[in-house]
Image: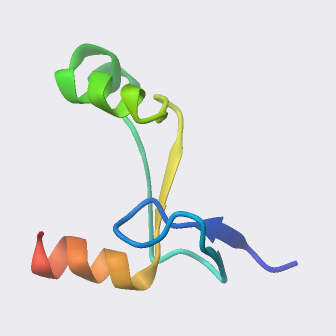
Amino acid sequence: MTYQYNCDGFCNRETIYSGHPALTAEFNEEWYKSSRIGGQLHEHEYDAGDLITLCPECTRRLLIERP
């Protein structure tokens, strides 16, 4: 079975990637619930327990280019 995911980064969120994402992360629930940024993320339909996935290109942009 091939792993499939949508990238939560800078690219088109409708694109479905196969293989493993380059980077995965989960929001810290305490931080999410107590910070202003957590509220902003909630407005964009993210929840505290969500797993965030980034494709290789978005990972490179985030960690190297830092837009």
Q: Residue at x 28, y 29 (%)?
A: 40
Image point 53% across, 40% down: which residue? 50
Work out whether 54 lies above or below 30. below
Q: Position of residue 25 (x, y in %)?
A: 42, 53
Which residue appears farthest toward the right when viewing the image?
A: 1
Judged left or right of residue 49, residue 59 is left
Look at the image and tell me in which quarter the N terminus lies: bottom right
Q: Is residue 39 left or right of residue 35?
A: right
Which corner quadrant of the image does residue 66 belong to? bottom left
Viewer-proximal residue among 29 and 39 = 39
Relative horizontal placement of residue 60, taking residue 55 as reference (left or right): left
**Whether residue 27 is situated above or below residue 10 in the rendered picture:** above
Question: Which of the 4 image quadrants contains residue 43?
Answer: top left
Question: Who is closer to the viewer here, 62 or 24?
Answer: 62
Residue 60 x, y percent position in the rendering: 27, 82
Q: Horizontal and vertical percent for residue 9?
A: 38, 64
In the rendered image, the quadrant that contains the C terminus is: bottom left
Please tell me which residue is depicted at 23% across the width and 78% down the height of the picture.
Answer: 61
Residue 7 location (% of width, % of height): 50, 66
Tell which residue pokes out farthest to the top in this image: 34
User: Within the image, what quadrant is residue 58 found in?
Assistant: bottom left
Q: What residue lies at 46% left-to-right and 77% top-to-bottom? A: 55
How many numbered badges does the structure rendering display? 0
Q: Give the vertical position of 13 relative to 45 (above or below).
A: below
